[in-house]
Amino acid sequence: MGLLVAVGITIQDIPENLATIIPLYCLNKKKLKSFFIVSGTAMFELFGFLLGYIFLKGAPMELVGASLAAAGGFMVYISLDELLPSAQLKEHLIAGSISVALGIATVLLLGLLGGVSIR
């Protein structure tokens, strides 16, 4: 299950980083500077992983599950409050709807391929 979550987050990180670096590059017109800024934001993910590994290594599954649920809640909130409105779905309804559906279907497919039952 942990591997599936990691793969899902990795797949999600690709368009997220593209959505970060493209406007940044458009503002400063410097590829290397934009790359280093986005790379710096990715370091927070590595730092979070290390903290989670250190503090949750021997933790009960209830605490690990609560941590994953909290992370999922953060991601859902950011998606609904920030990302979807920024995507201007009203102006590009078809493309936005297809993208949201493909994202959900991809994660569900990963779960099915990994043997996780959908309840």
Image: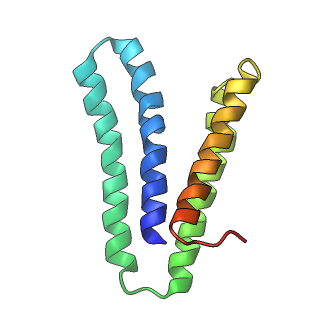
Figure label count: 0
41 and 3: which is toward the camera = 3
The residue sitting at the left extreme is 32
Q: Residue 7 placed where, x, y %?
A: 43, 57
Q: Residue 5 placed where, x, y %?
A: 48, 62
Q: Does 87 sit above or below residue 114?
A: above
Left or right position of 23 against 50: right
- Residue drawn at point x = 62 percent, y = 41 percent: 102
Q: Quadrant of residue 30?
A: top left
Q: Residue 67 placed where, x, y %?
A: 53, 71
Which quarter of the rendered picture does the C terminus lie within? Answer: bottom right
- Snapshot colouring: rainbow
- Residue drawn at point x = 58 percent, y = 56 percent: 109
Q: Quadrant of residue 82?
A: top right
- Residue drawn at point x = 57 percent, y = 49 percent: 106
Q: Does 50 sit above or below residue 76?
A: below
Q: Does 20 sit above or below residue 1?
A: above
Q: Quadrant of residue 17?
A: top left
Left or right position of 48 against 82: left
Q: Does 58 sit above or below residue 117?
A: below
Q: Residue 35 placed where, x, y %?
A: 28, 29
Left or right position of 116 against 52: right
- Residue drawn at point x = 35 percent, y = 81 percent: 57
The reply to whether residue 89 is in sight is: no
